[in-house]
Amino acid sequence: MNVSLASAQEDFVRAQVAAGRYASASEVVREGLRLLEEAEHRRLVEKWLYNDVKDEELALLPEELRTRVKAYFRNLIEEGLRSAEEGGWIDGPKAMEKLRAELKAPPDS
């Protein structure tokens, strides 16, 4: 596969390799694509949370990620039910704030 880059992007790639951060231009491009893929996954998960995603979009998310998201919300619901049974309440805005922060946080490596 051949890819054309704007001159500024080409300069950036060369600078990354020259600085020793990457061994080759291919490594730089692969890292950029990995980051783009992560961003797309975050976008789809967020859309899944706030809107309804189409089955085709949901299929773009790795199964492991879908499983983690479902488990996370299942745990939140169970925690809320336990808290309600005990007479406590989970503050909705704080829960959503926490969720947004987690979605924006870089994934664990």
Image (cartoon, helix red, strand yellow):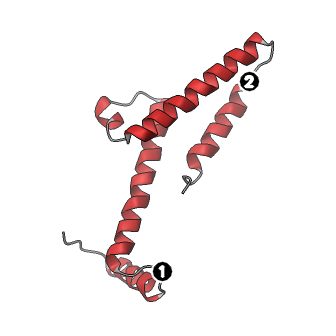
- The quarter of the picture where the N terminus appears is bottom left
The picture quadrant where one finds residue 47 is: top left
2 and 1 marks in contact (CB < 8 Å): no
The residue carrying mark 2 is 90
Q: Is residue 84 above or below residue 24?
A: above
Q: Is residue 87 left or right of residue 41?
A: right
Across and down, in percent, residue 61 comes to 37, 41
Tell me what residue is drawn at x 36 percent, y 62 percent: 33
Across and down, in percent, residue 6 comes to 31, 76
Across and down, in percent, residue 97 comes to 67, 38
Dot label at residue 21 = 1
Instruction: Tell me how far mark 2 sits from mark 1, CA to CA.
Output: 45 Å
Tell me what residue is drawn at x 63 percent, y 26 percent: 76
Element carrying mark 2:
loop
Q: Is residue 105 above or below residue 15?
A: above
Element carrying mark 1:
loop
Characterize the local packing of mark 2: few (<14), some (14-19) or many (20 or more) Cα atoms within 10 angstroms: few
The picture quadrant where one finds residue 87 is: top right
Q: Nearer the viewer, residue 71 or 30?
A: 71
Dot label at residue 95 = none
Tell me what residue is drawn at x 35 percent, y 34 percent: 58
Which kind of residue does numbered mark 2 sit on?
Ile
Outermost residue on the bottom side: it is 18
Q: Is residue 87 above or below residue 69?
A: above
Outermost residue on the left side: it is 1
Q: Is residue 80 left or right of residue 11?
A: right
Across and down, in percent, residue 42 comes to 47, 45
